[in-house]
Image: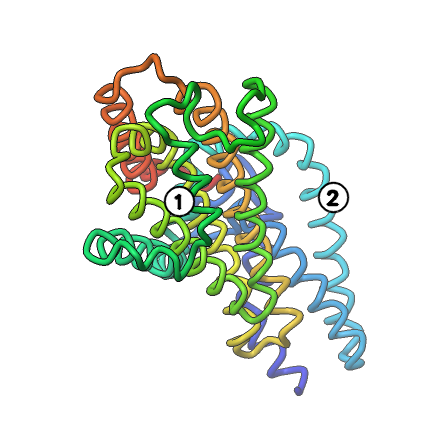
Amino acid sequence: MKESQFVQLRQGDWEAWDRWLGETGTRRGEKRGGAQAIAPNELPAAYRRLCHDLSLARDRRYSSVLVDLLQQRVLAAHQRVYGARRRLRGHWLEFLAAGLPRLVRRERRFVLASAALFFVPLLLLLGLLQLYPEGVYYLLSPEQVARYEFMFSPDAQRLGRPPSREAAGQLAMLAFYISNNVRIDFQCFAGGIAFGLGSLFFLVFNGLIIGATAGHLTQSGLVETFWGFVAGHSAPELIGIVLSGAAGLRIGHALIAPGRWRRVDALKAAAPDAVRLLYGAAALTFGAAFIEALWSSSRALPFNLKIGAGLALWGALLVYFLLAGRGTRAA
């Protein structure tokens, strides 16, 4: 690529850096002089692109003027970005309050794709097993079916506990639930490195397994024990799976359709937003584990209260992802 073509292609990003570095008395991310500077949540990816531009200019032996200008930008950006890192570490609450829902809305095509891959098999199988109950054995072994029936038996002292952990305390079950939820989330995310196919597989697979379990227990008449157990923590747990899958699909898309980038560069550019989605999924997953261990398994709480609380949490999370962070500056 000729130097003039390279400059024309990348000039917009360099001007954005110049505006960001030259801001005085203006909040970052606001429009200044009719143009948009770099938003704080875009800084890591933008800085890596700037460093990549400098590396390309050196490797292609572009003019010393261009190389010097890029080097000055890199040095100035390094001081500003990494000098501000300590301040940014304390902004995790701002990320949860506004940054995460904005990110989910921005990456909605991957979030919606992930939700479809997970919820459609789940709901289809849940309904199908009400008509063909024997179909559960195509996905679950007789031993697994018996274990789930034991966990949600009307005689169970604590709901949702497998036989091997029937006597376990609440802290032990909390650790068990966290481990199980993190395993599923990581599978859905890490599968993205296989060009998204791994994420696709784990989303569909987990949807089928959860749908088979829910469908069988519903058809078996264990409605109160099973749905009373899952109602409270289902929203954060299932949405966490969807966000993990969306993060994996984001990685897979960068590898399948890198555009004008090399695949490794497209992957680097996609990684920050994918990881931030995973952070959000982790927060939901940990919250779900606490609810599951301390609330869902209790037999003392009325069924109607559990269902009502679960529906309220679903509504609150949907409103949060749809509305939170609107009209505020980028996190």
- Give above or below for 264 relative to 82: below
Q: Position of residue 97 (x, y in %)?
A: 42, 31
Which sits earlier in the primary sequence, circle 1 or circle 2? 2
Residue 57 location, quadrant? bottom right
Q: Which residue is mark 1?
A: 102
Q: Which residue is mark 2?
A: 79
In the displayed structure image, the side of residue 207 where residue 169 appears, left or right: right
Residue positioned 43% across, 51% down in the render: 33
| Element type where label 2 sits in the image | helix
| Element type where label 1 sits in the image | helix
Residue positioned 53% across, 40% down in the render: 181
Q: Residue lying furthest left in this view?
A: 131
Picture mark count: 2
Residue positioned 56% across, 61% down in the render: 270
Mark 1 is on which residue type? Arg
Q: Residue lying furthest bottom in this view?
A: 2
Q: Position of residue 15 (x, y in %)?
A: 56, 61
Q: Position of residue 12 (x, y in %)?
A: 53, 66
CA gap, disc 1 and disc 2 = 27 Å
Residue 301 location, quadrant? top left
Residue positioned 56% across, 71% down in the render: 195
